[in-house]
Structure formats: structure tokens, C-alpha cells
Image: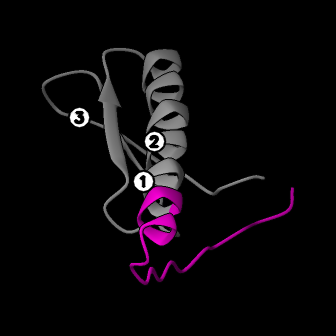
Amino acid sequence: MRYLVRLIPEEEGGYSVLVPGLPGCVSQGETRDEALANIREAIGDYLTAIEESMEEGESASVTVDVRVA
């Protein structure tokens, strides 16, 4: 799957990165490459948490914004 991410350069250095289609899925890094690696891990953790909550019988709702490049 592909997710659109928003990479934001920070004034004090480094980058923040978020996934608009996965509310609350954010990360950061000192370099662009580190920030992107960190958000890949955050996306995996986010999706795992949703899967586990659904297995426990909780309802989960996710809006996914997928862009094809």
C-alpha cells in the first residue's frame, strides 16, 4: 500500500512527517531519510494497533487517503 505523507521542515532543524489519511500517525527525524524511515515504521505500528483492536472486538474506523503516483 502507498500512503501520502506530508514532510515538514522544522525551523529548528529536522523534519516532522504526518500521514493525512491516518489521523494521529506522525513522526519526525533529523534528516529527510530518517523522517521517512520513521514514518514507515509508524504506519506499520498504526495499522498493527488497529488490527489488534479489531481482533479484540473493538470497532475501528480509519479514513485512508491513497494516492497512486
Q: Position of residue 22 (x, y in %)?
A: 47, 65
Q: Is 43 drawn above or below residue 56 in the view shown? A: above
Give the magenta-colored segment's residue range: 51-69
Q: Position of residue 28 (x, y in %)?
A: 31, 31
Q: Position of residue 40 (x, y in %)?
A: 55, 34
Of marks 3 and 2, the one in the foreground: 2
Q: Residue at x 31, y 61 (%)?
A: 24
Q: Position of residue 45 (x, y in %)?
A: 45, 42
**Residue 49 badge:** 1
Left or right side of 30 for 46: right
Magenta residue check for 58: yes
Identify residue type, mark 1. Answer: Ala
The residue under label 3 is: 10
The residue under label 2 is: 45
Question: Of the residues under marks 3 and 1, which one precedes in the sequence?
Answer: 3
- In terms of depth relative to the viewer, which is nearer, 8 or 29? 29
Circles 1 and 2 in contact, beta carbons < 8 Å: yes
Main SS category, magenta section: loop
Identify residue type, mark 2. Answer: Asp
View extreme (right): residue: 69
Disc tally is: 3
Q: Residue at x 49, y 71 (%)?
A: 54
Circles 3 and 1 in contact, beta carbons < 8 Å: no
Quarter of the image where one finds residue 30? top left
Magenta residue check for 8: no
Crowding at label 3, few (<14), some or many (≥20) Cα neighbours within 10 Å? few
View extreme (left): residue: 12
Crowding at label 2, few (<14), some or many (≥20) Cα neighbours within 10 Å? few
Q: Is 68 drawn above or below residue 31 in the view shown? A: below
Of marks 1 and 2, the one in the foreground: 1
